[in-house]
């Protein structure tokens, strides 16, 4: 399968923990990566591989995976975390790249 | 640090060919996959295709008949051509570097760790 499914929108109270999920058959073979995109800006990688954060990404961002579902967890969400979040991976063949439809995170 | 910069016309007429170039600075084009991704207004990210530094390519099956991606290692550039464009091809176009790490057992994982700022392309007469 070449599809990754995300909830369109999620909200979280300031300082609370939120989990954003991504489902797809390819996630049984490949790790999901997570990107944050703020309005008018390019996506930024926040989690890659098993649970790796690029330099400069706060440690409140973490990733996990089970079966065909990957999750991005933000522990202690901040106002600046309000953004669209996209998951991606290779498809089951490994030859193509796929993106989830994106989740709009609102921090209340 | 590696930076990517997209360049090309911001306006393309219907039925014509969209051409964009991504210039890689601060690093080599070798040993990575180089992708094009687009984002129509108000919508999500769509992968268009990638080229490996050696020249091998893979394209989104939904766009494959219209897409060509090429690389010029001597200029540290890679390029996108999308033919027979329509209004549906109006989008912000991003170039990105895809890195890979080996996890054992013949398996790798891949992630896009460097992105260009994006360039807006409008298809209109």
Image (cartoon, rainbow, N blue to C red):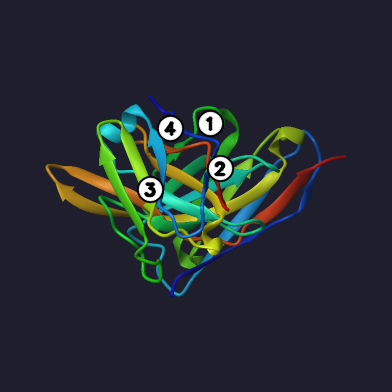
Asked if the residue under mark 3 is in contact with the one under mark 2, i.e. CB atoms within 8 Å, the reply is no
Q: Quadrant of the N terminus of chain B?
A: bottom left
Q: Chain of mark 1?
A: B
The image position of residue B60, as x and y in percent, is 49, 33
Residue B64 - label: 1
> Do tags 4 and 1 sit on the same chain?
no
Check disc 2 and report the residue beneath it.
B45
Q: In the visual, does B42 lie left or right of B70?
A: right
Check disc 3 and report the residue beneath it.
A72
Task: Tell me how far mark 3 sits from mark 1, CA to CA.
Answer: 31 Å
Q: Residue at position x 39%, y 67% from top?
A: A58
Task: Tell me how far mark 2 sits from mark 1, CA to CA.
Answer: 17 Å
Check disc 4 and report the residue beneath it.
A4
**Badge 4 element:** loop
**Badge 2 element:** loop
Task: Tell me how far mark 4 sits from mark 3, CA to CA.
Answer: 14 Å
């Amino acid at each position: 399968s070449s599809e990754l499914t995300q909830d369109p929108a999620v909200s979280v109270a300031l300082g609370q923990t939120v989990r954003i999920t991504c489902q797809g058959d390819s996630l049984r073979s490949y790790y999901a990566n997570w990107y944050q995109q703020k309005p008018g800006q390019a996506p930024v990688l926040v989690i890659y591989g098993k649970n790796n954060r690029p330099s400069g990404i706060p440690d409140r961002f973490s990733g996990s995976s089970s079966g065909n579902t990957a999750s991005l967890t933000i522990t202690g969400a901040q106002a600046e975390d309000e953004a669209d979040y996209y998951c991606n991976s290779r498809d089951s063949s490994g030859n193509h790249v796929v993106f989830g439809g994106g989740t709009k995170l609102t921090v209340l | 640090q590696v930076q990517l910069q997209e360049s090309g016309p911001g306006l393309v007429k219907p039925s014509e060919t969209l051409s964009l170039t991504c210039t890689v600075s601060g690093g080599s084009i070798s040993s990575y996959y180089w992708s094009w991704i687009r984002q129509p207004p108000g919508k999500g990210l769509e992968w268009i295709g990638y080229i490996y530094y050696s020249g091998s390519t893979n394209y989104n099956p939904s766009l494959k008949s219209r897409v060509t991606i090429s690389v010029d290692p001597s200029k540290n550039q890679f390029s996108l051509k999308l033919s027979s464009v329509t209004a549906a091809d109006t989008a912000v176009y991003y170039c990105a570097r895809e890195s890979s790490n080996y996890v054992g057992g013949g398996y790798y994982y891949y992630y896009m760790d460097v992105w260009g700022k994006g360039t807006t392309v409008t298809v209109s007469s």
